[in-house]
Image (tube, rainbow, N blue to C red):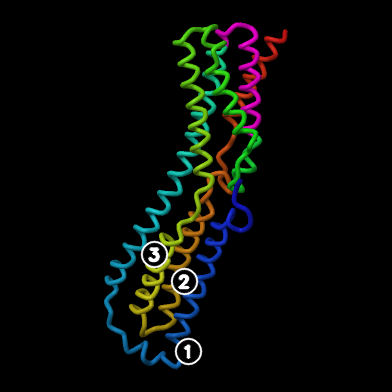
Amino acid sequence: MGTSGWRAYDHYAYAAVAMLGTLAAVVATYWLLAGSPWSEWARSLAGVSSPFTNVVGVLFGLTLAFLANDTWTAHDRATNAVLREADAIRGLLIVSRTLDGPERNALHAAIADYARASVAEWPLLARRSISPAAIDGGDRLLSLAASRAVGASVGGTVQQLMLRQVTAIRESRDLRIGLSQTHVDPLKWLSMAFLGFLTLLSVAVVHVGDPKAALVAMVLFGSAAAPTAAIVLIHGNPFQRPSVVASAPILAALSRASVADGEEAA
């Protein structure tokens, strides 16, 4: 029920390719200008004006910016999903206090079990997998909230409110699972890499008459482009390092459920 092997961490591999590929492109282009059998032909291309690099460079920058925006947006959506899930757990816990004793105890226990299973699911999210216990916990919440005993205890209006909270819990979990299983789109990043290589060649062509100047310009461009792309890539999964969406809000909701269970036991 998940992705195993390198595909669970494929964005780290793509980040390494971005760094090593940029280095290889700089070295190969400098060799073409300074030491290859085609260096004289390359130097015959002199005369391209420097503003030409702006055309390709802007396209490359925009493409990278859009990809970065997709990544940060996914992180924001994952964070919001966790917050909504925790808020729905707290809301269900509060509403469930209107139930009679047996139904209240059963629902509080189900809320606590689901919250524990949800928090325990976090390491699995990093591997793009899911927890069967969390699935069962969500199903149990829905079954209890929709039961006739709950409806008879609190009435239809309050039961509908409980069902909305359970639905919000399940929808938020589905969203964070979907975001955890998002893979790097090779076509998007291939287009970005192609535009980056064209920008690198444009920089080299502008300085084709002076290979050392071309090398300095290419190194500066590569030093800006490759680490930026790598940083975006390694943030591809919101539930993996280095920037992990925390389970703290659900842990806080779990502590409240535990407190409620303790009060009832007392």
Q: Label 1 sits on what residue type?
A: Gly
Identify residue for label 2. Answer: 219
Type of secondary structure dominating the magenta stretch: helix
**Above or below, comparing residue 174 to residue 47 in the picture:** above
Tell whether label 2 touches label 1 (CB within 8 Å): no
Residue 70 rendering spot, x and y as whole percentages: 42, 49
147 or 145: nearer the viewer? 147
- Numbered label attached to residue 191: 3
Q: Amino acid at mark 3?
A: Ser
Quadrant for the C terminus, please.
Answer: top right
Secondary element under disc 2, as helix, strand or loop, is helix
Element on which disc 3 rests: helix
Which structural element holds mark 1?
loop
Residue that appears at 48% across and 80% down: 28
Q: CA distance from mark 1 to mark 2?
A: 18 Å
Q: Residue at left 34%, top 57%?
A: 62
Q: Nearer the viewer, mark 3 or mark 2?
A: 3
> Which residue has dot 1 on it?
35
Seen at 43% across and 52% down, the residue is 68
Residue 103 part of the magenta segment: yes
Q: Which residues are magenta?
A: 97-119
Q: As drawn, is 200 to the left or to the right of 175?
A: left
- Going by the numbered disc 2, the residue's amino acid type is Val
- Across and down, in percent, residue 34 comes to 45, 87
Cα distance, mark 3 to mark 2?
Answer: 21 Å
